[in-house]
Image (cartoon, rainbow, N blue to C red):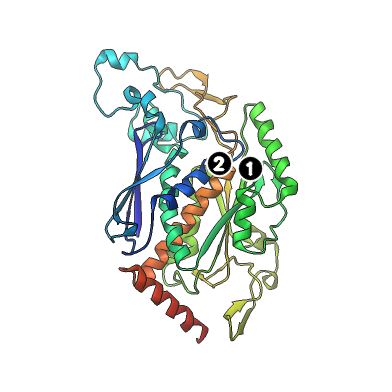
Amino acid sequence: MRYLTAGESHGPQLTTIIEGLPAGMPIENVDINEQLARRQKGHGRGRRMQIEKDTAFISSGVRHGYTLGSPIALVVENDDWKHWTKIMGSEGLTEEEAEEIKRKITRPRPGHADLNGGIKYGHRDLRNVLERSSARETTVRVAAGAVAKKLLSLLGIEVASHVVEIGGIKANPAPYESIQQLQEVTEASPVRCFDKEVEQQMMDAIDDAKKKGDSIGGIVEVIVEGMPVGVGSYVHYDRKLDAKLAAAIVGINAFKGVEIGLGFEAAHRFGSEVHDEIAWDKEKGYYRKTNRLGGFEGGMTTGMPIVIRGVMKPIPTLYKPLKSVDIDTKEVFEASVERSDSCAVPAAAVVAEAVVAWELAAAIVDQFPSDRFDQLAEYLKAYREEVKEF
C-alpha cells in the first residue's frame, strides 16, 4: 500500500493517489473531510485557514461508497488559486507578463528549504521551492491518513493524538479512561490538550509569540489501541515497524525528533525500569504489565498501546524575520515573509495521527491477505484468536 502527493501551496489543487487498499472497504467523502477540518483548527493558525475550507473529492477508485481495489484519487482544491493563476500557472509567459509578476523570491528564509532547494534544482526564483516544500502539502497526507484511519477503525484499531507541550509549557500525563474520551476532550480544546489546567497557559504563550512577531513549537503524542501482536519484523532493519513510524513522523514539515514509549528518558534509567514484564491470562492472552517501550519490541508490535511522540520546531517564517542573503545581489536582507502561523502544533498533531495511521494500515495490508476487505477482517480476527492460544 502506498500513496503519492502532488500540488503546490498556491496551485489549483492538491492531489493524492492511493494504491493497494483492499476492495470492498466502505469509505465516503465525509470520512476524509472530517479529518481535513480537524487539521485546520487550533489556536495560533494564520489567515490561510480562513481562506481555505479544505474538502476532498474522491475522483476514482470508489463506487457507491466502497473501494474497488483500483487506485484511489483524492483532490483538494485551493480556494485561493483565483488570486495566483498568473503567478503559479503552468502556461508559459510572455516577457511583458513575466515583468508584471512581482512575486519572485530571491531571499531565502532561514529554516526553510528555500536556499538548499534552489541550489539543488537550479531555481533562481525560490518560489519554485517554497510552493512545494510548504506544509500545505500535509493537507493531502491527512486525506490519505483519513482513509487509513477508516481501515484501522473497521478492524478495531483506534488512533488519537494530543499535544503534550507548547513553548516549554508541559501538560501533565493524560489520565484518560479510553481513547474515545481522549479524543473527545482534546477535540474540544483550542490547543488539542487533555490537561485543562495548562490549556490557557499554552494559548497565552502562543499569543505572546504572535505579538512579538515570533513563533513557538512543541511536542505531540499519538496513541494507538487495538494493534495485533507481531506486526512488523525483526528480520531486516527496513521492515521494523517502529522505524517506519519514526521516519513518518520526522517526515512531517518542521518535525525534528521522535521517541517511542519512554524514549530518551530510557537513557536515564536502569534496564529494570525500562523493560516491560510479560504476563498471560486466559482472556487477554499475553500482555505486558507496563508499557514503557510504547508498544514495540524488536521492531514489532506487542499488542500494547502504541505511544509515539514528535518534536515540532517553531515555524521558521517570522514576522520579525531573521537575516538572509539575496541570491542575486548577495546583499544582506531580512528574509521575506509569507503568510504564516505563530504556532501549528495542535494542527501538527492531526498530521502526526494521519502518518502513523498510514504506516500501521500499510503494515497490516502488507502482512495479511488483503485483496478483499472482508477476507482481511476475517483473517485478522482468526489471527487474534490464534495469538491467544500460542
**Rendering quarter of residue 373:** bottom left
Q: Position of residue 350 (x, y in %)?
A: 53, 49
Where, quadrant-wise, is the N terminus in this rendering? bottom left
The residue closer to the viewer here, 330 or 204, is 204
Element class at badge 1? loop
The residue closer to the viewer here, 225 or 299, is 225
Q: Which residue is mark 1?
A: 190
Q: Is residue 67 above or below residue 97?
A: below
Q: Is 371 displayed left or right of 160 in the figure? A: left
Q: Earlier in the sequence, mark 2 or mark 1?
A: 2
Q: Amino acid at mark 2?
A: Lys
* Residue 368 in view here: no
Q: Residue at x 27, y 58 (%)?
A: 70
Q: Residue at x 59, y 33 (%)?
A: 342
Q: Position of residue 41 (x, y in %)?
A: 55, 41
Q: Is residue 12 above or below residue 347?
A: above
**Rendering quarter of residue 370:** bottom left
Q: Amino acid at mark 1?
A: Pro
Q: What crowding class fits label 1: few (fewer than 14 Cα within 10 Å), some (14-19), or many (20 or more)?
A: some
Q: Are marks 2 and 1 in contact (CB under 8 Å)?
A: yes
The residue closer to the viewer here, 316 or 87, is 87
Q: Residue at x 41, y 45 (%)?
A: 140
Q: Which residue is mark 2?
A: 41
Q: Residue at x 34, y 14 (%)?
A: 100
Q: Position of residue 371 (x, y in %)?
A: 30, 68
The residue closer to the viewer here, 384 or 6, is 384
Q: Position of residue 322 (x, y in %)?
A: 57, 26
Residue 16 is tagged as: none
**Rendering quarter of residue 132:** top left
Q: What crowding class fits label 2: few (fewer than 14 Cα within 10 Å), some (14-19), or many (20 or more)?
A: some
* Residue 20 in view here: yes
CA separation in Å, label 2 and label 1 = 8 Å
